Image (cartoon, helix red, strand yellow):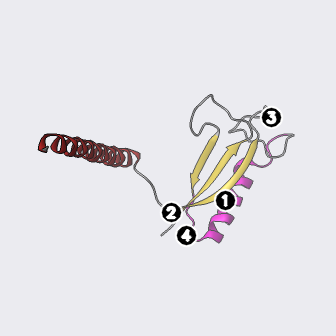
Amino acid sequence: MDDFYLVLEQKQEGCDYTIGCGMEAIKLEATTPTEALLQGEAILTERYMPSGPKYGVSDHYGADGESELHTAQVMRLVGSIDPQALFLHLKAKDIAIEEMTHKDERRVEYEKLKKEFEK
């Protein structure tokens, strides 16, 4: 079964260098893309529209106009990546390549020395 999320992003960047600052992901209970869109629209209507004189400004994001709701997207989660496992795998791969390169360099040096001393 697919997981669907409503991903909201404020108009301005928000915090300095913070991943996901000014963003919110709401897990939906929908089981189909159509249901997810309808549920996303219902959440937007219920929680974010309208809130004061500026249409689309959320109290959650603040009503200062600087943090106006910019995008609302329904996304389907297709999988996740474990960054730690990925980095460990890549590091192991790099070490193996480095070791093979070092062996190749030693093999070339060995062949040179072998030719030199076989004369």
CA–CA distance in space, label 2 to label 4: 13 Å
Kindly identify which residue carries mark 2: 78
Q: Does the magenta stretch include residue 35?
A: yes
Do the residues under discs 1 and 4 have CB atoms within 8 angstroms? no
Label disc, if present, on residue 65 of the rendered structure: 3
Give the amino acid at mark 4: Thr
Do the residues under discs 3 and 2 have CB atoms within 8 angstroms? no
Helix, strand or loop for the magenta stretch, by majority: helix
Residue nearest the observer in this picture, 51 or 7: 7
Disc 2 secondary structure class: loop
Position of residue 83 measured from the top left corner of the image (x, y, whole percent): 41, 46
Seen at 27% across and 42% down, the residue is 105
* Front of the two marks 2 and 4: 2
Label 2 neighbourhood size at 10 Å, few (<14), some (14-19), many (20+)? few
CA–CA distance in space, label 1 to label 4: 13 Å
Residue nearest the observer in this picture, 50 or 6: 6
Which is more N-terminal, label 4 or label 2?
A: 4
CA–CA distance in space, label 3 to label 1: 23 Å
Q: Give the range drawn in magenta.
A: 28-52
* Front of the two marks 2 and 1: 2
Q: Is residue 95 left or right of residue 31?
A: left
* Residue at far left of view: 118
Give the amino acid at mark 2: Val
Disc 1 secondary structure class: helix
Which image quarter: residue 108? top left
Kindly identify which residue carries mark 1: 40
Kindly identify which residue carries mark 4: 31
Q: In this view, does 109 lie to the left or right of 64?
A: left
Do the residues under discs 3 and 1 have CB atoms within 8 angstroms? no
Position of residue 41 measured from the top left corner of the image (x, y, whole percent): 71, 60
CA–CA distance in space, label 2 to label 1: 18 Å
Give the amino acid at mark 1: Gly
